[in-house]
Image (tube, rainbow, N blue to C red):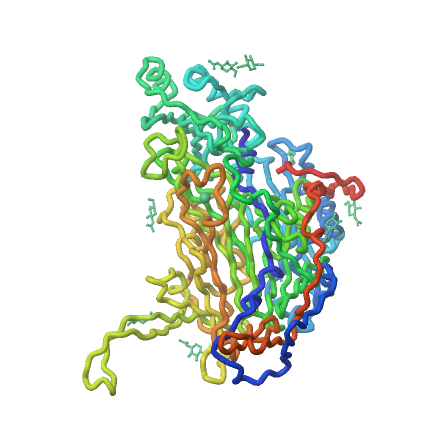
Amino acid sequence: MTMSSMKLLTAVFLIFGTLVPSAVGLPKTPWVQQRTKGHGRKLFGASIEKRGQKVRDDCIVKSALDIDAPKENIWAGLTEQEAVGVVEWMFAQPELNLTVSEDAGSWDNTLLLVELMKPNKTDALSYVDESGSLPARYAHAVISHQADEDPYYQDILVGPLPAANGTTYWTPLEYPYTRKTEGKVRNLDANEDALYDEWLFKVSATISDITLDLWNATALGLDNDTLSIWGIDPVYQEDDQILRWDTFWSNPSTIFDVGSMMPMGLFFMSDVSGRDTSKWTVQGWYYNGIFYETTKEFRTAYWSGKVEKLDGNWDGPWAETDQQGTIPPLDTMAPPVATAPQGARYSVDAERKYVEWMGWSFYIGFDRDSGMALYDIRHKGQRVLYELGLQEALAHYAGSDPTQSHTAYLDTYYGFGPFAFELLKGYDCPSYATYLNSSFYVSETTHTHLNSILSTVGNYDYMFSYSFFMDGSIAVEVRASGYIQAAFFAKNHDYGFHIHDQLSGSMHDHVLNFKADFDILGTENTVQLMEQVPHTTTYPWSKGKVFNTMKLNRSYVENEDEGQFNWGFNNQKQVFVVNQDKNNKYGEHRGYRILPYTGSAHLTVQNSTVLKNSAKWAEHDIMVSRRKDTEPRSTHTYNNQDTENPPVDFSKFFDSESLNQTDLVLWLNLGMHHVPHTGDLPTTVFTTAHSGIQFMPTNYFTVGANVETVNMVRINYEDGDATDVIHFGAYDGTCKLDYEPAFVDLWEYKGDVVVRKFPYSPDDLYYETDSI
Ligand SMILES: *[C@@H]1O[C@H](CO)[C@@H](O)[C@H](O)[C@H]1NC(C)=O
Ligand SMILES: *[C@@H]1O[C@H](CO)[C@@H](O)[C@H](O)[C@H]1NC(C)=O
Ligand SMILES: *[C@@H]1O[C@H](CO)[C@@H](O)[C@H](O)[C@H]1NC(C)=O
Ligand SMILES: *[C@@H]1O[C@H](CO)[C@@H](O)[C@H](O)[C@H]1NC(C)=O
Ligand SMILES: *[C@@H]1O[C@H](CO)[C@@H](O)[C@H](O)[C@H]1NC(C)=O
Ligand SMILES: *[C@@H]1O[C@H](CO)[C@@H](O)[C@H](O)[C@H]1NC(C)=O
Ligand SMILES: *[C@@H]1O[C@H](CO)[C@@H](O)[C@H](O)[C@H]1NC(C)=O
Ligand SMILES: *[C@@H]1O[C@H](CO)[C@@H](O)[C@H](O)[C@H]1NC(C)=O
Ligand SMILES: *[C@@H]1O[C@H](CO)[C@@H](O)[C@H](O)[C@H]1NC(C)=O
Ligand SMILES: [Cu+2]
């Protein structure tokens, strides 16, 4: 297995889920009210069913209603023409000195990314809320400058679009980052091509007699290799010194990509500073609890019989996902299916990626780094959130060995966009769901993942779900699945369970950061806290008796110094985003409560040696900062390239500014403390690797918005007999269902559609799946 297939494993993201429309809210299940006994409420618009009266129709199966979004989707991404224009224009700028990726070596400059630069919120609101013009469009591009002793990545802005000689210009992009270095960050990947052939295989060759003796296996860069070598991410950085720890993994012998579960327990450290691979050095070896300073010391110890030999880890049925074992009773029968008997009850503008359902509406944006985000989320036309989306996903490992200890994947480095693969209809989402394409740019080509987004997004395979409910609440959930990255068992019991022959389920924290830019009845909002506290008091009526009870303690998050905190003890703290200037008629602030749903987590590690300043957002559950065009995102894709001085150091967002009635952003962490056990073999499953958060309207409506639905029924009864069955207007017929739409032809699965942008060849599209 190569380094790049390792990346795949640790950052394979399936996008799927029940995005909006299928995530229906409360009153869908008819309820029975037991206490009315036939008198009580007036029934406006209700109808009373006669015994035996039922309508029988044929089900009308239709897909989502087509609508036109009220505005253009200004977050959706570049059009085909825009992307082609920008790429052509950039290749024509001599100072950018770009080489087409296909022809580029490790000393050429290449264009890594071209995507839409999302508009500033002020410009976006002037267009979306008022009659302002469409915000000027710019492209965000990333160049890898490798024609340099000190290679670097650079973010630049190109625009305005469409690209044209004379009017379009490029500038270094600096304003969205806390580090002010013209959008540049050092590039530690420039020697990627040389790493294996000029280094790792050469080091491995110096001890291939040992790997043969230990495991009858080698990693020499030959077709018949039976071992792979890969190691830590990010590489360990001490100022300009760049250190790697690498380890051996046995190669899978089948199509199952299980290499990350096959560690062999032999580790070596290299100093790989600088571009000259002839200056790189081995800094030591580690095996079974003992560190050897030099290759010679390790070889001498080994061949003098002083090294205790342990077995390795090899694949087999225990690591494969195909069915095995006893089939559960009735399991061969067709499972229940979700159906929409009269057709979808939601509307979609597929071109503009705009969705409406039961009073909710939103636009979908998509980018390479973080995948899908939702914009301008409204309930009955009133915006609740301007932006809601993933920022970063961290998997921070720990262990007795140097590889696990140094591993803390920051997944946007690999990008969520490229790993949002085609969904399987009927498996990942109901077959009647609407599947939208997602596109991203790589090496002068645009890849389109067919049917990859719905309204839900999702190495692990992550599944992201955004659910909208009829009571006005929203849920954000993430689930993780896939093959774990396991550790060698030796001396690792404080860091995981023993799960296979020589295998430890390596402990790690998943922390996923989301941006929630609330706009509750306007952009100016405040975060209010309300804690239940034990209370001892006397009351006028208690005749002097001291009462032990509880009460509410309200406070505001006044400024950014108070802006980072955790869920309280025993869930006694409630967190609200309110608008203090928009009270309801009882004088209560209208707002939304943010509440933990199915478990959330922030990073256990404090002041991580590996991450340094590159993931300060991971240290709390909830963070509130003032919203700024200069702080659009809590991290940067290349934060792992300079962990001490990353492009975005989240802690710098917090500089004592007032948070009283101002436009603010909540940065919210979901996550899981994951200590894999035998149930994580062959894969971790979604049932419990699950974290969620909810947003709940609080004093926002006069009564619960859920009462508006007609999808309810009341049954009055008396003496054991139903006396009335009362309907409110919902279709109540029965119909014959043609199951065809519930079963899909999986042979339709295609993979990516790739279109070359430079030179532009729209008619020469091709399919590709494993190019990443
Ligand atoms: C442009 O890049 C090439 C490598 O692709 C390099 O040899 C050359 O020196 C660069 N030119 C300038 C002006 O930097
Ligand atoms: C812009 O200039 C480049 C060369 O400088 C030329 O190849 C290209 O055709 C021009 N594009 C337009 C749209 O005029
Ligand atoms: C060692 O591996 C080679 C090929 O990988 C195989 O042909 C040979 O039988 C193995 N030897 C032992 C002792 O397993
Ligand atoms: C692997 O291939 C190399 C070169 O083709 C050969 O010298 C070596 O004997 C092979 N090793 C095994 C275990 O078959
Ligand atoms: C997705 O892309 C395919 C291929 O280009 C196209 O046929 C299909 O209409 C697109 N789907 C949507 C919803 O735009
Ligand atoms: C009430 O909250 C304030 C502000 O958070 C805090 O300083 C105070 O100690 C709390 N009072 C009680 C009784 O918990
Ligand atoms: C974080 O750890 C580093 C290295 O051990 C130390 O220099 C620094 O003071 C620590 N910072 C905090 C805030 O504890
Ligand atoms: C967006 O806001 C930043 C920060 O104020 C500013 O530097 C930039 O020019 C703005 N972009 C546009 C297109 O106006
Ligand atoms: C916060 O804003 C509200 C409403 O605008 C105002 O009444 C209150 O005095 C402000 N509080 C502080 C501490 O400035
Ligand atoms: Cu995990």
| Residue found farthest to the left | 544
Q: Nearer the viewer, residue 64 or 733?
A: 733
Residue 674's place in the image compared with 589, above or below, is above
Vertical relation: 658 (above or below) 416: below
Q: Residue furthest right?
A: 763
Q: Please provide percent x and percent y for residue 269.
A: 41, 29
Nearest to the observer: residue 400 or residue 135:
400
Q: Position of residue 751 (x, y in %)?
A: 68, 41
Of the 4 image quadrants, the one containing the N terminus is top right
Total count of labels: 0
- Compared across the picture, whether 307 is left or right of 335 comes to left
For the question of whether residue 723 can be seen, the reply is yes
The structure residue drawn at horizontal position 19% and vertical position 84%, both measured from the top left corner, is 544
- Locate residue 286, reporting x and y percent: 36, 27
Answer with left or right where residue 25 lies relative to residue 139.
Answer: left
Residue 158 seen from this side: no
Q: Residue at x 33, y 17 (%)?
A: 301
Left or right: 562, with 173 as reference point? left
The one of 432 and 743 positioned closer to us in this rendering: 743
Image region (quadrant) for ligand 6: bottom left
Q: Is residue 13 left or right of residue 589?
A: right
Can you give x and y, in whole percent of width and height, for residue 711 in the image? 61, 70
Quadrant containing the C terminus is top right
Q: Nearer the viewer, residue 309 or 467?
A: 467
In the image, residue 280 sits, relative to residue 156, either above or below, namely above
